[in-house]
Image (cartoon, rainbow, N blue to C red):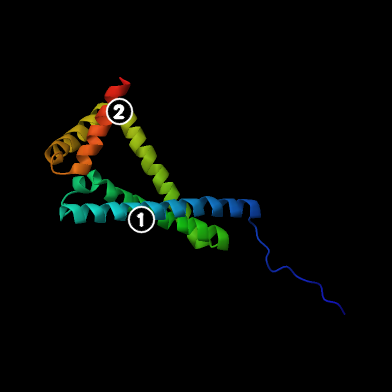
Amino acid sequence: MHRRRTQNNFTYVSPCVKYMIFMLNFIFWLFGGLLIGVGLYAFVDKWQATGLVKVETIYDVVLNISLVMVIAGGVIFVVSFAGCVGALRENTCLLKFYSLCLLIFFLLEMAIAIMGFVFPHTMQSVLEESFTDKIIQTYREDADLQNLIDFAQQEVSWRI
């Protein structure tokens, strides 16, 4: 007798959705790796040029664009990797981690937007008090920060 073939590759997920999620997350995964690479290159280049990179407070991390790039790239790299592999392998654990991370990012973004909308003057005063003093103190010490501020001021004054 001839046996019928059984399909062992049954899935509840549409292949179109599966591969679309995979491709989008693969692109973000590459982008995260690129951010990590460029951020590390900029950090090492600055470290070799100046001899030291000061990272004592949270303001030093926020105002150092190379560290921000490495941190953001690392987060994007890990989350998109979980989405990429989770979608391709239909791994529910990775997909739940991916969904939870996206939910947390969305809720944080919404909370910041709502706080900025409900308390605009408070948010503005907190940001001005926190960053203005630190930027003024480190303006002459950090050439990259100085170039960034000068560029931003030239662009804003050009458009006004």
Indicate the amino acid at tag 2: Glu
| Residue drawn 86% across the image and 77% down it | 2
Seen from the viewer's position, the closer of residues 47 and 89 is: 47
Residue found 47% across the figure and 58% down from its top:
82
- The residue carrying pointer 2 sits among few (fewer than 14), some (14 to 19) or many (20 or more) residues within 10 Å by Cα, namely few
* Residue at the extreme bottom of the image, as rendered: 1
The number of numbered discs placed on residues in the rendered structure image is 2
Judged from the image, the secondary structure of the residue bearing numbered disc 1 is: helix
Q: Quadrant of the N terminus?
A: bottom right
Q: Is residue 90 visible?
A: no
Q: Residue sitting at 81 percent across and 72 percent down?
A: 4
Which residue of the protein is positioned furthest toward the front in this rendering? 49
Which comes sooner in the sequence, label 1 or label 2? 1
In the image, residue 35 lies at what x, y percent? 37, 51
Query: Which residue corresponds to the image point at 49% horizontal and 51% vertical from the top-left?
Result: 27
Q: Outermost residue, top direction? A: 160
Label ID, residue 155: 2
The location of residue 76, given as percent across then percent down, is 40, 52
Q: Are marks 1 and 2 in contact (CB under 8 Å)?
A: no
Alpha-carbon distance for marks 1 and 2?
28 Å
Task: Give residue 47's quadrant in the image.
Answer: bottom left
- Residue 125: percent from the left, percent from the top? 20, 30
Inspect the image, locate mark 1, and give the three-letter code of the amino acid beneath it.
Gly
Quadrant (top left, top right, bottom left, bottom right) of the C terminus:
top left
Q: Taking 152 as reference, is 144 above or below it?
A: below
SS under mark 2 = helix
Residue 70, compared with residue 146, is above or below; it is: below
Residue behind mark 1: 37
* Closer to the camera in the image, 121 or 58: 58
- In the displayed structure, 150 sits above or below 92; it is above
Residue 22 shows in the view: yes
